[in-house]
């Protein structure tokens, strides 16, 4: 008899637990973004993957601020990072952590689309090729960071992964988020000039392919409210042909 009562009691608890789980709000995607790794080097992809693993699963409580640098840490050899091309004053040089900025950029756009409050975001000197002008987010440990705050009354989770040539980041939560749309207002496009070194009659090699310059403003429309997110003025990078 005692066993029967115990069995009935346990069944009741199990049923109650099942009902509670069924009634619990389900986690869903509040906003996500992806960028292509197709033209990135093997070392850049490696560094991007390491940083993706560090931010995947990060939980941001209500009112808390996410720091990219705090989660990823130093982009050093000790952390497993490799030397890879990074842009330094417009020139590509090999440095530890090249490729990490693609992870921070993808994360930034996921944060924008999920309604996160942007606390800190820094552009690259010249606009990178893997995202539209004004949508990039440069990082450099510790001095240059990406930070955003969770404005919701429920915790959110960052999910990040590399799937084939796509680097994907999403922000997930169990509550109702904002319906967000990003508008790019490209106000000005400036074309690069070409500079030649040496005899113009001689065969040459392209030392710098150049980049267009932009003045761009980014707006976010969230639940019908329009907000200016950033105003960026990217300089022109001129082409250089070496004919010496």
Image (cartoon, grey):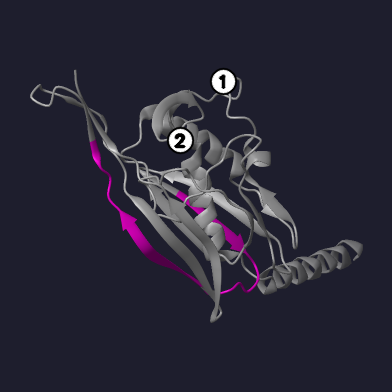
Q: Where on the picture, by quarter, is residue 91?
A: top left
Give 94 or 107, whichever is nearer the viewer.
94
233, above or below 81, in the image? below
Vertical order, 244 against 209 (above or below)? above
Q: Is residue 45 left or right of residue 148?
A: left
Quadrant (top left, top right, bottom left, bottom right) of the N terminus: bottom right
Q: Earlier in the sequence, mark 1 or mark 2?
A: 1
- Quadrant containing the C terminus is top left
Q: Write the residue at 56% across / 20% down.
A: 77
Residue 205 is labelled as: none
* Range covered by the magenta-colored residues: 168-194
Residue 214, placed above or below residue 83: below
Q: Which mark is residue 99?
A: 2
Residue 200 picture location, percent across and down: 12, 26
Tell me, yes or no, whether the two marked residues, 1 and 2, touch with CB atoms within 8 Å.
no
Q: Is residue 44 visible?
A: yes
Expressed as whole percent of the image width and height from the top left, the position of residue 218 reads 48, 64
| Number of residue marks | 2
Task: Name the side, left or right, on which 201 lies relative to 25.
Answer: left
Q: Quadrant of residue 84?
A: top left
Q: Which mark is residue 77?
A: 1
Q: Of helix, strand and loop, which one carries label 2?
A: loop
């Amino acid at each position: 008899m005692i066993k029967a009562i115990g069995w009935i009691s346990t069944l009741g608890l199990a049923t109650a637990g099942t009902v509670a789980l069924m009634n619990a709000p389900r986690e869903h995607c509040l906003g996500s973004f992806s960028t292509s790794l197709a033209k990135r080097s093997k070392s850049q992809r490696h560094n991007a993957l390491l940083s993706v693993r560090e931010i995947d699963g990060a939980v941001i409580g209500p009112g808390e601020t996410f720091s990219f640098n705090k989660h990823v840490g130093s982009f050093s050899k000790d952390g497993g990072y490799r030397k890879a091309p990074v842009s330094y004053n417009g020139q590509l040089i090999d440095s530890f952590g090249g490729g990490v900025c693609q992870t921070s950029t993808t994360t930034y756009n996921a944060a924008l689309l999920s309604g996160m409050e942007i606390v800190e975001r820094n552009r690259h000197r010249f606009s990178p090729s893997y995202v539209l002008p004004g949508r990039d987010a440069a990082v450099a440990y510790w001095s240059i960071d990406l930070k955003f705050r969770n404005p919701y009354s429920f915790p959110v989770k960052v999910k990040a992964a590399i799937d084939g040539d796509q680097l994907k980041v999403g922000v997930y939560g169990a509550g109702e988020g904002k319906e967000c749309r990003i508008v790019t207002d490209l106000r000005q496009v400036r074309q690069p000039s070409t500079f030649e070194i040496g005899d113009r009659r001689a065969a040459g090699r392209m030392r710098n392919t150049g980049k267009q310059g932009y003045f761009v403003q980014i707006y976010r429309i969230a639940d019908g409210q329009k907000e200016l997110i950033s105003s960026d003025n990217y300089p022109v990078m001129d082409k250089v042909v070496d004919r010496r």
